[in-house]
Image (tube, helix red, strand yellow):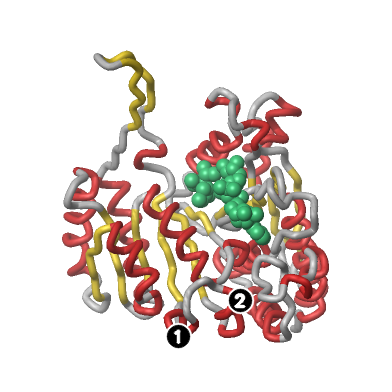
Amino acid sequence: MSEVKKIAVISGDGIGPEVVAEALKVLKRTEELFGYSFETEHALFGGIAIDQKGTPLPQETLDICKNADAVLLGAVGGPQWDNNPKELRPETGLLAIRKELGLFSNLRPAVVFDCLKDASTLKPEVLEGTDLMVVRELTGGIYFGEKFRRQGDQGEEAVDTCVYNVTEVERIIRQGFEIAQKRRKKLASVDKANVLETSRLWREVANRLAPEYPDVELEHILVDNCAMQLLRRPSSFDVIVTENMFGDILSDEAAMLTGSIGMLSSASMGEGSYGLYEPVHGSAPDIAGQELANPIATILSLALMFRITFGYEDAASAIEEAVAEVLNAGHRTSDIAVDKSKAIGTSQMGDLILAAMKK
Ligand SMILES: NC(=O)c1ccc[n+]([C@@H]2O[C@H](COP(=O)([O-])OP(=O)(O)OC[C@H]3O[C@@H](n4cnc5c(N)ncnc54)[C@H](O)[C@@H]3O)[C@@H](O)[C@H]2O)c1
Ligand SMILES: CC(C)[C@H](C(=O)O)[C@@H](O)C(=O)O
Ligand SMILES: [Mg+2]
């Protein structure tokens, strides 16, 4: 019997509980098939925590996460909290949990499944062979800089500051190089060095580190051009390393290469093997409670947890192969279905993936 691994489970808001429920079914199936043991502990987070505990990130939730080996997160947010003051917003909790757990590196793989090429809005021949990884800096930049309002000469002003120190930049760019070394050895460092001082520091650091990774081909690309090239030549990208806000935007763009944001998984890491795993998508209030959510992003995030935090490559591959098998057999949730009338629901998709899992 293997050692019991502790997983903190945060369902959150909107479709969060629906997609996490499917991932937990897969977790249980993994125990049965491979003999691994997991202990799960559920914690309140986001809008539901604001309603029940008066804060998006209760101390108890943070403690449960810190005591676990990994965290599985659904999504947070919703219109009912959109007009709350900053400290009572679900998204504030999301930034706080990333910071508190030291998760500076957010890995967002975007892989185009052959059978889903017709689900994308782009031409299939453009998507052919696309398999890229966005490495997004997650605990710095404009998300975490000082923010305030003030009175200016022409009325009220709002200020968001973007700060990066050299240590923050160096550790994430090293991540980019190291991940590229294990892949196709191409690194696109994305910045706005023609305008932003933080980006000029970013580029200097990338150039300084490059000689330490002579096997990796480094390309600098401005973020506006990168947004365009992602649609023009997506398959030419291997690893993209970029700052917090650019990574947020480019990863949603990359989602559409795969057909839907419901396909995009993510891992948020610090220095060690501890990680938080969540789909890239949000709480999708427009489809919540209707069995319409695609659970694959969350299920694939669980596969990333098995691979990266626990080193359970067999279980990770079993999940990924089961997802591919179900998609190849033509099953689709409505976000990736060409013929929406044949689409299946959230739990049906989860059940099919379970059934397809093999040792
Ligand atoms: N990590 C997170 O928890 C996270 C991430 C992004 C947004 N949010 C929050 O979620 C709320 C909604 O944000 P949004 O609408 O901009 O982004 P969103 O990702 O929730 O939804 C964007 C669109 O994609 C669709 N979609 C998303 N996930 C899907 C899935 N699994 N299956 C099928 N369709 C899916 C939605 O129906 C919607 O049309 C906001 O409160 C936002 O702050 C949270
Ligand atoms: C909800 C929001 C704060 C979050 C982010 O911008 O990081 C989300 O868009 C994401 O991509 O995880
Ligand atoms: Mg985002």
Q: Identify the secondary structure beneath mark 2.
A: helix
In the image, taking residue 100 as reference, residue 54 lies left or right, namely: right
Crowding at label 2, few (<14), some or many (≥20) Cα neighbours within 10 Å?
some
> Where is residue 41 drawn, in percent x and y?
75, 47
Label drawn at residue 125 = 1
Residue beneath the point at 69% across and 53% down: 7
Q: Quadrant of the N terminus?
A: bottom right
Label drawn at residue 58 = none
Q: Label 2 belongs to which residue?
A: 313
Q: Quadrant of residue 72?
A: bottom right
> Where is residue 196 drawn, in percent x and y?
21, 45
Residue type for callout 2: Glu
Number of marks drawn: 2
Residue type for callout 1: Glu
Task: Tell me: residue 49, above or below residue 274.
Answer: above
Task: Tell me: residue 224, above or below residue 81.
Answer: below
**Residue 57 in view here:** yes
Residue beneath the point at 76% across and 83% down: 358
> Where is residue 163 drawn, in percent x and y?
29, 38
In the image, taking residue 93 as reference, residue 230 lies left or right, namely: left
Q: Earlier in the sequence, mark 1 or mark 2?
A: 1
The front one of 199 and 233 is 233
The front one of 237 and 25 is 237
Q: Identify the secondary structure beneath mark 1.
A: helix
